[in-house]
Image: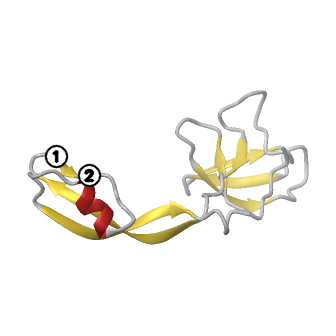
Amino acid sequence: MAIDFTKEVETCDDPPRPVRILCTDRPGPLPVVGLIDGRNLQTWGADGNYGSNSPMNLRNVPEKPPIKWVKAWVNVYPNTGLNIPNQTKEAADKLCSNIRVACIEIDWPVYDEEAGK
């Protein structure tokens, strides 16, 4: 897969390290110049490779799936914290046990299937 140097780039290390690309047109066999972790100057081939299967090879940072925030209700219990989120307070009330301390409304992140298309 080709690297898009106009997007965020990272090394293939574990964990990956951020790379700031300075240029992609340097003369010679290693035209890509960047800073690893903002301080270590390094060069790569036009395809982002440093060497065969090297952890120093580059890749685009994976895009995070779009999320949306929805209202949810959770039951709170002593010594265990929060329970699973429910879409309505009525649903949370229906699933609660007699040791519930509270039922609170929260903002809950969910994958936005419409935005992901």
Up-down: is 26 above or below 79?
below
Whether label 1 touches label 2, CB < 8 Å? yes
In the picture of the structure, the residue carrying the numbered disc 1 is: 80
Pointer 1: residues within 10 angstroms few (<14), some, or many (20+)? few
Of residues 27 and 4, the one nearer the viewer is: 4
- Measuring from the top left, give residue 26's x and y in whole percent: 85, 56
Q: Which mark is residue 31?
A: none
Label 1, secondary structure: give it. Answer: loop
Label 2, secondary structure: give it. Answer: loop
Q: Amino acid at mark 2?
A: Asn
Identify the residue shown where x is 70% and y is 30%.
54
Q: Amino acid at mark 1?
A: Thr
Q: How many marks?
A: 2
- Measuring from the top left, give residue 114's x and y in whole percent: 67, 68
Q: Quadrant of the C terminus?
A: bottom right
- Measuring from the top left, give residue 92's x and y in whole percent: 28, 61
Up-down: is 92 above or below 58?
below
Identify the residue shown where x is 10% and y is 52%.
98
Identify the residue shown where x is 59% and y is 37%.
13
Q: Is residue 107 left or right of residue 67?
A: left
Identify the residue shown where x is 90% and y is 43%.
29
Of residues 74 and 20, the one nearer the viewer is: 74
In the picture of the structure, the residue carrying the numbered disc 2 is: 83
| Disc 1 to disc 2, C-alpha distance | 8 Å
Colouring = secondary structure
**Residue sitting farthest toward the top:** 52
Q: Quadrant of the N terminus?
A: top right
- Measuring from the top left, give residue 21's x and y in whole percent: 71, 59
Pointer 2: residues within 10 angstroms few (<14), some, or many (20+)? some
Up-down: is 48 above or below 113?
above
Report which quarter residue 22 is drawn in.
Answer: bottom right
Report which quarter residue 39 is drawn in.
Answer: bottom right
